[in-house]
Image (spheres, rainbow, N blue to C red):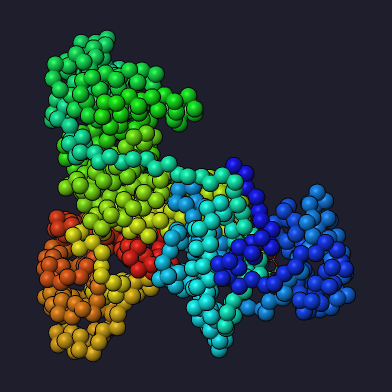
Amino acid sequence: MTQKMLSEAEGYDILRKYDIPVPAYQIVKNGEDAAIAAEKMGCPVVMKIISPQIVHKSDAGGVMVGIGSRKAALGAFTRIIDNAKAYNADAEIDGVMVEQQAEPGLELIIGGRTDPAFGKVITFGMGGTMVELMKDVTLRILPVTEDEIRQMVKEINAYPLIAGYRGSKPRDEETLVKIIGDVSRFFLENEHIVEFDINPLRLYESGACAVDARVIVTDTVHQAVKKEHPPVPLEYFTPRSIAVIGASQDSSKMGYAVMHNLLHFPGQLYPVNNKRPEIQGLKAYPTISAIPAPVDMAVITVPAVNVPAVVEECGAKGVSMVVIITAGFKEMGPEGKALEDRVVQIAKGHGIRIIGPNCLGLIVPPRGIDTTYVHQSPKPGNIAFLSQSGAIINTVVDWSLAQNIGFSNVISVGNQCDLDFIDYLRYVEKDPKTKAIIMYIEQINDGKTFMEVVSEVAQSKPVIAIKSGSSRRGSAAASSHTGSLSGSYEVYMEAFRKSGVIAVHTLTGAFLAARMLAHPKRYPKGKRAVVVTNAGGFAVLSSDYAERYGIELIDLPREVIDELNEFLPEFWNKGNPIDLLGDATEKRFEKTFEVLTRHGDLWDMAFIVDFPNLVLTSEQLARQILKFSEKTENRVIVTMLGGDSLNVGREMLKEHDIPSFEELDFTYRVMGRVLWQKFRVKAPGLL
Ligand code: ADP
Ligand code: MG
């Protein structure tokens, strides 16, 4: 695959076909012709070097603007050529471009690149020579709708410069929207164009003009091969009998740990070991074929070279799912890849599905299944965790025990030679125990299918994702302005947002978000909030955090204040956050909640914030919160700020899937992230 950069003139010619305004130009090879062209075109003109080796022409002294006469054009020609030669002695020089000088305008950038996972992506932002410095860009995965383009334009920090800032007239936003649409079409329809940027596009009070175009084409169009995803019956994940092939009595071996964690499995468990008659107290079989009863799932821990033969035997035995823990496949290079392909072929022939290889396998706590070698199996619960890293699973499981978090499923996806994120998402979507899904993702192969599937899953269950490991690929693709402005990581973030996935940056954040969303009401309907608290200090902090994370605290209308006046002490703050004061009793909270329930159409979520004190026990408050949450259609979010003295209340809420957070900043930050997903709030907090 070779890539080459088109000349600016070629770029202009294609853009013009898509109705994008570009300056008239002429290519000249000597000073005389430059002078004639300048005169014919009408001064002032701009002159630019044409060289495939000079990407950033200004850096090479290859752009001269404001050329006002024949004579100036003659001089400019020589200077541009001299500058270019001084900049890069080996650069091929194809001539000089003489082009009409466009009026000054607001300089914007529209760029595009091809992401290895998600395909063609378009970026938009502040342009000119300071793009890298300002980094004020936003992006979308193509195709885009006009609405999305409009939103994109409004999203950049410099949008006020487009809308009209401090007395300056508004710019032609309609033309801009149309041009971004035309540019998207240009990018999508020309398969061989892999990257481009128009920097700058000058935007005027009326109209616009693109005054630079850098377009990169490839000679081979890469067609992504789509993997098939035949549905996996739910029973494949709920085996009645499991064989461990390579089960061991030697505690230093993987086959020991795996067997050990499976001892709690309430179904039939068969160790397979050709040297011992008994493993960890269970009768062992020399081969899987020797087991005198059906086997649903086989967990394989034997060395990689032996795996094809073992899978063949599993096929003969009628196994439906194999979990290949063994490493030494695709991740080891071409030989390993060939071995892995062979295993896939054999499995396919028998209709066997594969988890792994090079993974920990799966943990299904509600069914006592644990094929991993984690220290201690996690508790059953409602979170499904799909991870591309085994180590992270070990950490998360260990934490979960201390923090009393339970799982419906934990799946280590490994090399994903057969089943991959897409299949696992489909599975946990159907799994009745799963209420929220967390994914740890290093890389997705088929981004388009992933987006399709995860969008569907996210409709019924919240999906939260942590993405890592993007910088290597991102920087490889970042060969240009646009590339470096929108790395792969940003593309993933946009893919997540577009498909309804909540993106987080930390594991703690992932679990906070999962707890927030595992509630049946899940998302608030909007971003309008009320805060009810008995702590003045936390009322102030609530205002700060809400503003920081894009949550809108409403102004209380007169009638609500009047209703509250009826029972609150005279000197209450008469605003939102509603400060019920330190001596607030259960009754005061109850009556306030009643007022808010009656006015439920004014707000979308209520933040309840309390601290430990003697006039209100956490149990009393929890009782009122449960009643409130039941009566209102809106989301109720609780922060109980204190130590163990609040545990009774926290537990009562937890039983009803109402999370109670313990750090106020987190509460608002988590909600900010959730709202980012739905409403694309500005500057959501990192989680
Ligand atoms: P570079 O390769 O350095 O990006 P450009 O072609 O973008 O070179 O030119 C550098 C700058 O010169 C542009 O950012 C723009 O401000 C100005 N410029 C270029 N072409 C024109 C033109 N036709 N009319 C007016 N200004 C121009
Ligand atoms: Mg430029």
Give the residue displayed 67% in from the left and 79% down from the top.
103
Q: Nearer the viewer, residue 97 or 669?
A: 97
Specify whether 623 is left or right of 230.
Answer: left
Q: Residue at x 57, y 79 (%)?
A: 207
The residue nearer to you, when weighing 506 against 456, is: 456
Query: What residue sits 24% from the left and 33% below the top?
Result: 370
Q: Is residue 500 above or below residue 432?
A: below
The N terminus: image quadrant: top right
Please state the horizontal and vertical placement of residue 241, each as a whole percent of the image.
16, 27
The answer to whether residue 322 is seen in the rendering is: no
Task: Establish if 543 lies above or below 557.
Answer: above
Percent across and percent down for residue 314 are 25, 21
Tell whether 311 sits left or right of 295: right
What is the number of callouts on the image? Answer: 0
Kindly indicate the quadrant of the structure image that contains residue 257: top left
Task: Measuring from the top left, give residue 15's x and y in whole percent.
Answer: 59, 65
Please state which of residues 551 and 106 is positioned toward the viewer in this rendering. 106
Which image quarter holds the C terminus?
Answer: bottom left
